[in-house]
Image (cartoon, helix red, strand yellow):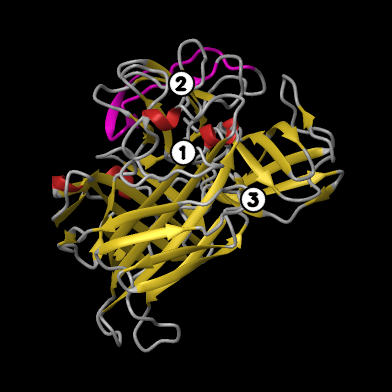
Amino acid sequence: SYAPPGLPNSAIAQGSIFVIFGRNMGPTTLAQATFPLPTVLAGTSVRVTVGGQTVDCYLIYTSAGQVAAVLPSRTPVGTGTVTVTYNNQSSAPAAITVAASSFGIFTIHQGGSGPGVITDANWQVNLITNSARPEQAMVLWGTGLGPVTFDETRGAPVQDMKSAELEVWVGGKRARVDFAGRAPGFAGLDQINFVVPPGIEGCYVPIAVRVKSVASNFATMAVSPRGGACSDPMSFSEEDQGMIGAGKDTKIGTIALSRLDITLPPGLPVSSYKNDVANASFLKYDYQKIVGSRGVSYATPFGQCIVYTFTGQEFNPLVDPVRPVGLDAGAALNLSGPKGNKQLTRQAPGYYSATLGGGMPGMPGAQPDYLEPGSYTVDNGSGGTDVGPFRATLNITSPVVWDKAVGDTVSRGQDLPIRWSGGTPTEWVLIMGSSARSNPEVGAAFICTERAVAGSFTVPSLVLSALPASDPQGGMLIVGSSPLMERYKFKASGLDIGYFTYSMWSAKSVTFR
């Protein structure tokens, strides 16, 4: 799951596979174990101590920078330490928390988010080009269902660990589970056989597992009534899918204008302020990267939610671990609107940005607000070496109005109703919440989407339970509207797909408890 310490699902489950990252932990060339799994492999061993009891872990592979092992099911539950020894040199102890169960979904890019490792009955991997159908039987792969009583150094026998405390949620609906347990013939690897609920459709449908009230990481899966390539208004259309295929690159350009109108807690010199920014990216994905990515909007199909995590002081849950190749679209992009002209400058290959206006009044760098309803045009002059000249236009309309009828404290154990007014059938609403803590520096954010004309949405407690409790005022709720992705597309030589879009968001500082 790659859940960092401090998150509700960061514990290591008894009997699960876990990975340690570091330096000089093993040989420079990866050494792979065979059955029976050893406790010493190529000079590497891993020991976990909890409650005064020390266990030797079963090694799967070892290398200088990464070691994978199975935590024995007999390991006590609680907090303790883990130590790696290589050629008789031991590391400093690192903190570890052991739980009876804490499921982690494997993902295609192996980073804990984005498309999950999910297969059909014929072991074909679920991809945006190979969707599941509603009511189809599928297999979800991961680790962390809980302890077992058989010999963990050898391939697992068939043993169903399904229970009433195990839940699989797909697109906000609980799925039927037919089997859950160790994958026969493997060590520590779990499989969950489930049935896709009816009425589900989209390219990035969220999927999560909850065991004994603890939610896993959130991954996604592709679902389409016809199978094959998926499509939905929040990601790739059927036309876009024609640009994606095995053995070919897909080149995507995205230009986004956004306003964040922030309401601050009482007692500060100002009660609110706005930030107007523009960001653009021109990226080339090979097939493996595009099918493993979070998509172009990072958003779910309508009426659904997903959770992303982040670490450190920077709030960056929307950074996709998949790294495509940047394209040269020119030295800068030129933006014109009702309040004049601005320029997006190149920050890195393929990436452009600009602060358009706003800022906290009285503080250095504050500018007049820029993004207001009206017509906006962007171009790249004579173009760049990879992307030819283009000109795109959109019209910003009045955003939806969030009533902000939410207290200063949000309970992670209860559903959270959100209401707004305004909006048209060609717009969608983003509902986002982030919760961050300083010790350790870790956080998580949820993203939900709904049709603007719906007027309301309820964030499920399952989603909120995946967030950490925040520091006081260390959380934020954001609600805003955007046009559908298909509405303002543009074409340019060197691009397969081009999107020009905007977001008008309103934010409120809260504390998550």
Establish if 355 lies above or below 445. Answer: below
**Magenta residues (range):** 155-183
Q: Secondary structure at mark 2?
A: loop
Residue 504 - label: none
Q: Which residue is mark 3?
A: 385
**How much space separates mark 3 and mark 1, taking CA atoms?**
48 Å
Q: Residue at x 41, y 71 (%)?
A: 341
Q: Residues within 10 Å of mark 2 (few under 14, many from 20)?
A: some
Q: Which residue is mark 1?
A: 102
Q: Is residue 237 magenta?
A: no
Q: Is residue 4 left or right of residue 187?
A: left
Between disc 3 and disc 2, whose residue precedes?
Answer: 2
| Residue closest to the eye, 89 or 376 | 376
Q: Is residue 106 visible?
A: no
Q: Amino acid at mark 1?
A: Ser
| Residue closest to the eye, 341 or 124 | 341
Q: Residue at x 31, y 37 (%)?
A: 233
Q: Residue furthest top?
A: 122
Establish if 359 lies above or below 34. Answer: below
Q: Position of residue 130 (x, y in %)?
A: 46, 21
Q: Secondary structure at mark 3?
A: loop
Q: Residue at x 42, y 23 (%)?
A: 229
Q: Which residue is mark 2?
A: 130
Q: Amino acid at mark 3?
A: Thr
**How much space separates mark 1 and mark 2, taking CA atoms?**
29 Å
Q: Is residue 24 left or right of residue 180?
A: right
Q: Amino acid at mark 2?
A: Asn
Q: Secondary structure at mark 1?
A: loop
